[in-house]
Amino acid sequence: MMDVIQQLREQAKKLLEEKKVTLVIGFGQGTELARTTPVFIDSPEGVSALTWGPFCANNLAKYLTDYKNAEGNVAVVVKGCDARSVIRLLDDNQISRDKVVVIGVPCPGQLEWQKVAAEVKPGASLKETADNGESFSVKTDAGDYSFNKKDYMLHRCLVCENPNPVISDITIGKELPVKTYEERFAEVSELEQKSTEDKSAYWDKQFSRCLRCYACRNVCSVCTCQICVFDQMLPMWVSKRTNLSENTMFHITRAFHVAGRCVDCGECDRVCPMDIPLRKLNQKIHKDLGDLFDSPTPGSKPGIPSALGEFSPGDPEEFM
Amino acid sequence: MLKRLLEYVGFEPGRFQARWISGSEGAKFTTTIKDMTEKIKSLGPNKKMRDDIV
């Protein structure tokens, strides 16, 4: 992936030098081997901080809304899934197309950092990563490792719809074929089949762990409300008490608030400190949107109408 | 959509119902309410999202 990193840095440098953008948002090496951190680069000298590899799970499109009123243009590095967020933000009029330069990088999949960190010698520093099709090789100063994609990737990458960015001004690296390891809604279907009591028990167990840290909301690229319902005190739509009942209310509301706009980037699920499978809620909505409205994943193409945002005479009317 | 989501997180089917009834459809209103009351009575008290459950 060294060539991708090299090209990424060159393109970022060019954009900054030619003053086409004032800021480049990309991935930089984190303090641990298997982690990256978002980097915000405003000078051509800073581009050496940019990196790319199988540890770039963050959806950087989230930051675009922070700069929507900034004077200069912003370039952002996106993977296939993050590109859907960019389209969704554009369709929601949250950002303007002429102020954003999308640097798309076809993504070979992202590894779950905890799983990698458990294998790699602590304190080792990263030398190089490479995509070998079915696995990633990770070279460190404490030896070389190989990580099988099927076992070490994030679940969302196992069911990836588009590794190639659906919107991009500058594409870096070769386009990749779509490769999935399991049925997209397999987990949701399995849970749907269970009895009401079992489903209730399953979710009670998940929701009762919630700390109400709101990381899932803060990381969500389509959570763009200036004032969030969960922050409002008057009226207080959802109480701030952390108990099962209020947590259930919070999670149903959060999932439903992004219904029809959620691009299935899986960031809520990834950032949850309590490992609540939040994506299973959002995926249920995606599955129903597909079944009832024949709606593709939001953001997968520019300008697709939001299934819940408009009426068509052919819509199912179960409530009549 | 919401009905499906609620049933997915463990609410009984029929606990949440939605009907479109126009102002001129008195008969539909009565039958709907009767059916709804019967359904809810058969389900018994709601066990989820209650203030007394912590």
Image (cartoon, coloured by chain):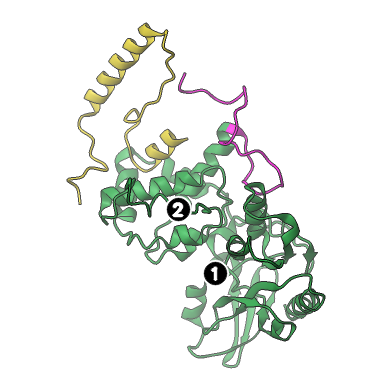
Chain colours: A green, B yellow
Residue A151 coordinates in the image, percent (x, y): 54, 67
Circle 2: is it few (<14), some (14-19), or many (20+) Cα within 10 Å? Answer: few
Foreground residue, A251 or A233?
Answer: A233
Foreground residue, B9 or A168?
Answer: A168
- Tell me which residue sits at (40%, 49%) in the image: A229
User: Which element is circle 1 on?
Assistant: helix
- What residue is shown with label 1? A152
Asked if the stretch drawn in magenta spans residue B27, the answer is no
Residue A71 coordinates in the image, percent (x, y): 68, 66
- Tell me which residue sits at (82%, 75%) in the image: A18
Q: Can residue A193 be spotted in the picture? A: no
- Tell me which residue sits at (49%, 80%) in the image: A117
Asked if the stretch drawn in magenta spans residue A304, the answer is yes
Residue A264 coordinates in the image, percent (x, y): 56, 52
Residue farthest along the bottom direction in this orientation: A141
Foreground residue, A214 or B43?
Answer: A214
What amino acid is at disc 2?
Ile
Q: Magenta part of the protein: which range?
A: A293-320
What amino acid is at disc 1?
Tyr
Q: Nearer the observer, disc 1 or disc 2?
A: 2
